[in-house]
Image (spheres, grey):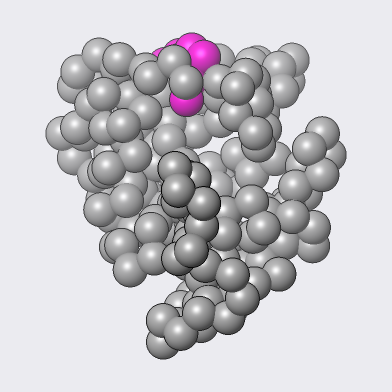
């Protein structure tokens, strides 16, 4: 698969010379096991088996009652359509800081700006999606935050949303499909979630 080295010199095909009117490819930042940028790859190519390790982010937003905002991914999504997942997730553009990417995508997908957004560590995982055959090889930057406004989901990205307590999440997770990465990122973010929401919230 074509990879663009971190120095910007293109290896393989690029958008330059693409047919007029063709959409620009979405590029992701490839990283090593320490999270150091080593190049870029086209989004779909990076997710095709066995997957290329790339930078990603996951956001967990809570309301004033300590309930987590979940989203069900739109059926039109090419990866993991129709499943429930965390508040927002995605990939920084090459050179974009993960915090900036998390804030950008939260606004684009949910139409909101968190009242607070804080870093919550990183997690590395390899999760194949059995339905699509795509693979999540990700170095994921985690963020937790507070939401004090009602979300306005973008329908091409999100089918529906729900605020849940830990008990409601457990019940929902037992009977409905969730993204392959959901529990991995939630468990990794739990220390920051507990610090944010307090003991009474039960996370």
- Give the side of residue 28 with respect to residue 102, left or right: right
- Give the side of residue 59 with respect to residue 138, left or right: left
Per the rendered image, the range of residues in magenta is: 157-165
Find the residue positioned furthest to the left. Answer: 115
- Circle count: 0
**Res 69 → quadrant:** top left
- Give the side of residue 194 with respect to residue 150, left or right: right
Task: Using the image, determine if residue 162 lies above or below residue 90.
Answer: above
Q: Which residue is drawn at 25% across and 53% down?
A: 100
Task: From the viewer's side, name the closer residue of 199 and 197.
Answer: 197
Find the residue positioned furthest to the front. Answer: 20
- In percent of width and height, residue 157 lies at 47, 25
Q: Can residue 88 be seen at all in this image of the molecule?
A: yes
Q: Is residue 88 magenta?
A: no
- In percent of width and height, residue 191 lies at 42, 51
- In percent of width and height, residue 129 lies at 77, 42
Task: From the viewer's side, name the closer residue of 66 and 37.
Answer: 37
The main secondary structure of the magenta stretch is: strand
Q: Residue at x 26, y 24 (%)?
A: 111
């Amino acid at each position: 698969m074509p990879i663009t080295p971190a120095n910007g010199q293109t290896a393989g095909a690029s958008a330059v010379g693409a047919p007029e009117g063709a959409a620009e490819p979405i590029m992701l930042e490839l990283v090593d096991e320490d999270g150091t940028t080593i190049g870029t790859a086209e989004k779909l190519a990076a997710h095709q088996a066995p997957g290329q390790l790339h930078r990603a982010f996951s956001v967990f937003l809570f309301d004033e009652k300590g309930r987590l905002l979940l989203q069900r991914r739109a059926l039109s999504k090419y990866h993991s359509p129709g499943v429930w997942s965390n508040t927002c997730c995605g990939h920084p553009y090459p050179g974009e800081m993960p915090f900036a990417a998390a804030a950008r995508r939260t606004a684009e997908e949910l139409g909101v700006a968190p009242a607070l957004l804080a870093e919550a560590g990183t997690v590395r995982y390899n999760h194949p999606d059995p339905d699509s055959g795509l693979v999540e090889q990700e170095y994921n930057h985690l963020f937790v935050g507070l939401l004090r406004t009602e979300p306005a989901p973008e329908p091409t990205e999100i089918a529906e949303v729900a605020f849940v307590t830990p008990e409601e999440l457990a019940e929902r997770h037992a009977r409905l499909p969730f993204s392959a990465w959901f529990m991995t990122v939630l468990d990794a973010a739990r220390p920051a979630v507990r610090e944010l929401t307090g003991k009474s919230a039960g996370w």
